[in-house]
Amino acid sequence: VARTLPTSLNQREAIDAARQQVIDTFRSNVICLLEYDEAHDEWIPKLTEGCAVKPTSSVDELPVHLRQAMDSREPWLVPDLTAGSLPGISPTSGSGLYTKLESRGRVVGVLGIEHATPGQYRDRDRRLLLGMADVVALTLDNAATQALDLGRVEALQADVSARPWWYFSA
């Protein structure tokens, strides 16, 4: 499956494009995309479908499979969530895929995908998610950088606008 970067750096549009790729590729019932906020050391939901998560979470408060994905180099596959004592992000999920999202050498987010049917996801799906995760991570990182840059420009414009006209005359 070929993956392309979204045409927009707008975070909402980029997340919507990632959502559609996840649905088209994995036919998931649950999608949970959390972005890491370095400034506050917390995880913020950017996309939640079929699940409920807190508005912000510490790493210890993340659903268990998302935490496990943080320690794995590749996507974490749980083919049967009904067989163990650790539920998925949604208590009705039967199988799941989970991955950390890394860009430019740092973790920018984490993504969980679940389906109601046990055995729905296999190793092939894990490999597909590995390729998709790189694009989603870069998209999140680029959109966050653009938002930060835009905030700096707006602050500079406000600073310039607040100064009297004579401040700039030589």
Image (cartoon, helix red, strand yellow):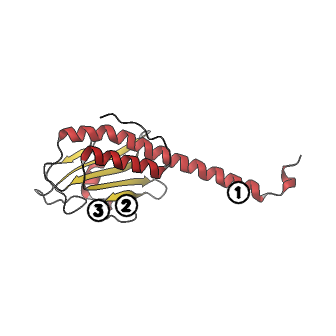
Circle 2 sits in a helix, a strand or a loop, which is it? loop
Q: Residue 22's spot in the image, x, y percent? A: 31, 47
Chain-order first, disc 3 or disc 1: 3
Do the residues under discs 3 and 2 have CB atoms within 8 angstroms? no
- Amino acid marked by disc 3: Cys
Q: Label 1 belongs to which residue?
A: 158
Query: Is residue 74 shown above or below 28?
Result: above
| Label of residue 55 in the image | none
Q: Quadrant of residue 37?
A: bottom left
- Amino acid marked by disc 1: Ala
Q: CA distance from mark 3 to mark 1?
A: 40 Å
| Label of residue 58 in the image | 2
Circle 1 sits in a helix, a strand or a loop, which is it? helix
Q: Residue 81's spot in the image, x, y percent? A: 15, 55
Q: Nearer the viewer, mark 2 or mark 1?
A: 1
How would you rate the neighbour count of disc 1 (Cα within 10 Å): few for under 14, some for 14-19, many for 20 or more? Answer: few
Q: Residue farthest to the left?
A: 83
Q: Residue 86's spot in the image, x, y percent? A: 17, 59
Q: Residue 4's spot in the image, x, y percent? A: 40, 36
Q: Label 3 belongs to which residue?
A: 51
Q: Is residue 135 left or right of residue 116?
A: right
Residue 14 visible in the displayed image: yes
Chain-order first, disc 3 or disc 2: 3
Q: Quadrant of the N terminus?
A: top left
Circle 3 sits in a helix, a strand or a loop, which is it? loop
Q: CA distance from mark 2 to mark 1?
A: 34 Å
Q: Residue farthest to the right?
A: 170
Q: Is residue 55 left or right of residue 163?
A: left
Q: Nearer the viewer, mark 3 or mark 1?
A: 3
Q: Quadrant of residue 136?
A: top left
How would you rate the neighbour count of disc 2 (Cα within 10 Å): few for under 14, some for 14-19, many for 20 or more? Answer: few
